Image (cartoon, helix red, strand yellow):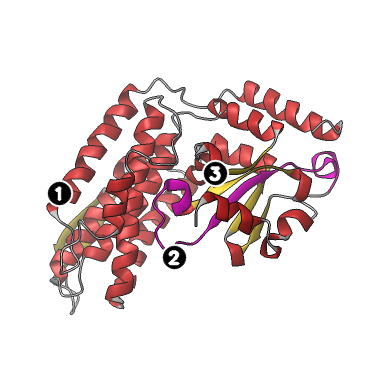
Amino acid sequence: MNIQQIKEKIKSNTYNFLRDNEHLGNNIILLTLGGSYAYGTNVEGSDLDIRGVALNKPQELIGLSNFEQFQNRETDTTIYSFNKVVNLLLNTNPNIVEMFGCKEDHYLVLTDIGKLLKDHIDLFISQRAIDSFGGYANQQLRRLQNALARDHYPQAEKEQHILNSINNQISHFERIYAAEYGIKLYIDKSDKEDYENEIFMDINTKHYPLRDFNGIYSEINNIVKEYGKLNHRNRKKDDLHLNKHAQHLIRLYLMAIEILEGNGIHTYRENDRELLLSIRGGAYMKEDGSYRQEFFEMVNDLDKKLKYAEKNTTLKKSPDMKKVEEFVMEVNKKVICNEK
């Protein structure tokens, strides 16, 4: 579908909820494309994702009513309330940030207040992008690495792979959990019948916050659980997903570097479209389902650029909350005074 066909589709009865739902209708200030259509990596048969922002109503601002988001799964449509978008933007949530870097003709609705929000996006962009975009990229890399560890690999090699995946999280732990977490992970011989080697850990910590430790344990546990899901693979289906993970990994790196370098938000990857589509199409995947060395060289190169951008970024460490609050009050005052 081209953009004109998409606009016509949005007018159809299938999307009547955009006009009829009590939280949407005239409250929508921004409506745009999401997913592959937003990135410019859509292919024939790609799903159409719609994302947007709707103002909170007066009773939700000064009364007892509440509205955070509306979702229609049949059409892959998600509309967030203005106040929720603000909170997500403060943490530089990639899915939300992407809504403000789309192609101009991809905005299906953009009211004066929507444009005001879009024009003030820099209020929210900070070094928090390191953890948000970097975290999302790390998830994609981990999924890719995990899935590439085939079932026929020797058990010892699989165990080493899990350890490598966990070690990739170490710098993330250091940023999120400022205190020394005192965990050492290593591989040693196992006494278990089905294991040659396995991962062990030494823990040496005192007066450590329980919730921080729980967070670290949960993240490590998720890596091990994800790896455990690999025992039942549908090769053809999984390869399609792997290529999408690989594509998103590169895209997230590119966007994160641009943001940290102060070059703005560019959701539509016009200059990278050919590369991303080639990754999605399997150009970097071998016949056995593994990836070519060139792909991992590309990832390593982008990772170095990201680390350099992290160290040299001029972005503020966190948003100026006073300015953000003033902006939010300005917008919500328009709602209460019926000036939207």
Q: Quadrant of residue 326?
A: top right
Task: Write down the region rendered in magenta.
Answer: 36-64
Neighbours of disc 1 within 10 Å: few (<14), some (14-19), many (20+): few
Q: Is residue 112 visible?
A: yes
Left or right: residue 7 compared with residue 148 = right
- Of callouts 2 and 3, the N-terminal one: 2
Residue at point 37% right, 44% down?
Answer: 252
Local SS, label 3: helix
Residue bearing the label numbered 2: 45
Residue at point 54% right, 44% down?
Answer: 106
Measured Cα–Cα span from mark 2 to mark 1: 29 Å
Q: Which mark is residue 156?
A: none
Q: Quadrant of residue 42?
A: bottom left
Local SS, label 2: loop
- Of callouts 2 and 1, the N-terminal one: 2
Is 24 part of what is drawn in magenta?
no
Residue at point 68% right, 61% down?
Answer: 12
Residue bearing the label numbered 3: 106
> Quarter of the image containing the C terminus?
top right
Q: Which mark is residue 294?
A: 1
- Of callouts 3 and 1, the N-terminal one: 3
Left or right: residue 83 compared with residue 333 = left
